[in-house]
Image: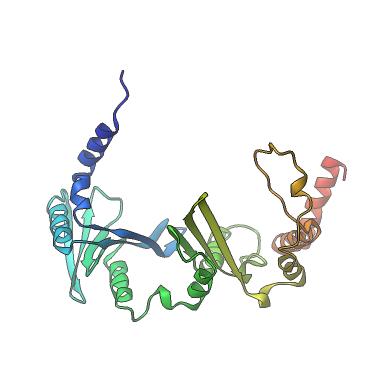
Amino acid sequence: GSEQSFEDLIAELETELGFSADEVQAWVGQYLGFGVLSFDIESETAEWITAVSVRDEAAADEFLAARLAEVEGGVVETVEHNGVTISTVNSGEFEQPVAVGRSADLMLLGSSAAAVQQAIDAQSGDANLTQNENYQTILADLPERRAATIYVNPASFSSLYEELTADLPVNTVQPGIEAIGGFGMALSVIDEGLQLDSVTRYNPEFLDETQAQLLNSQGILDSVSGQFPPGTVMLFGGQRLDLAWVSLREGLATSLGQQDFDEALGLFAQQFGF
């Protein structure tokens, strides 16, 4: 049979969603943000917010009212917060309730009314992510003009690791994980194409001597990477392999326990002969 056209695919998607791209285009602005406020690995749930900038508030309200009126087989509960009507939809169309509301020039979609309320409060400027010192520091080292931005709160590293390793026979806090002070990434459009930058912030007081030496050695000329053939498809180069092994060895010994780690190395030696 003939291949399905792009127009047909769009038409099928619009039928599935219950609204057209033109209806969204009538009000949507140029900015989009998605944030995870909290998560629980065991229950596989998370509190999250999606914020879409609104170009035409009247068209956005009309679109939202039409979507809520079309909810079938569910319940729509409303609550007011700082002058914003938040509608929570409990429907078979979604695995979990979804809350939505327009606050000034933002259309907010979240996992709960409480999550949307937090976003509304943040929008007022009294307390939001832009006032976070760690966020400011990381973004200051990323290109100012960027198409997309990712930021990870440092507290999430330890809490996520603890949840993932809760049932494992290792220490609940991975050595060195507490040293990570946050992570950021930016995608930028440049003349040559796309540029990807990343920044990881470290807390020096949590680094041991080996880890500190490893970080301080960055920027030293790598004399090996340039020795590959010109047609090399992919290259990964690095330095201070000696320090990297020492740091990895110390971390594994602490997590697994020295006795178990020594036994693992013994089995490796028996298998490979060194």
Q: Quadrant of the C terminus?
A: top right
Left or right placement of residue 146 versus residue 197 in this view: left
Left or right placement of residue 211 versus residue 2 in this view: right
Circle count: 0
Q: Quadrant of the N terminus?
A: top left
Which residue occupies the foreground of this view, 272 or 119?
119
Which residue occupies the foreground of this view, 159 or 177?
177
Query: Residue at 76% across / 72% down in the picture?
Result: 209
- Looking at the image, the residue that sits furthest to the front is 191
Q: Which quarter of the figure has residue 114?
A: bottom left
Judging from the image, the colouring scheme is rainbow
Q: Position of residue 103 (x, y in %)?
A: 23, 69
- Looking at the image, the residue that sits furthest to the top is 1
Q: Which quarter of the figure has residue 218?
A: bottom right
Q: Position of residue 33 (x, y in %)?
A: 36, 61
Q: Which quarter of the figure has residue 222?
A: bottom right
Query: Residue at 67% across / 75% down in the picture?
Result: 204
Left or right placement of residue 118 versus residue 169 in this view: left
Query: Residue at 15% across / 48% down in the picture?
Result: 72
Left or right placement of residue 127 versus residue 85 in this view: right
Q: Position of residue 55 (x, y in %)?
A: 22, 61
Q: Position of residue 66 (x, y in %)?
A: 13, 53
Query: Residue at 67% across / 78% down in the picture?
Result: 205
- Looking at the image, the residue that sits furthest to the right is 273
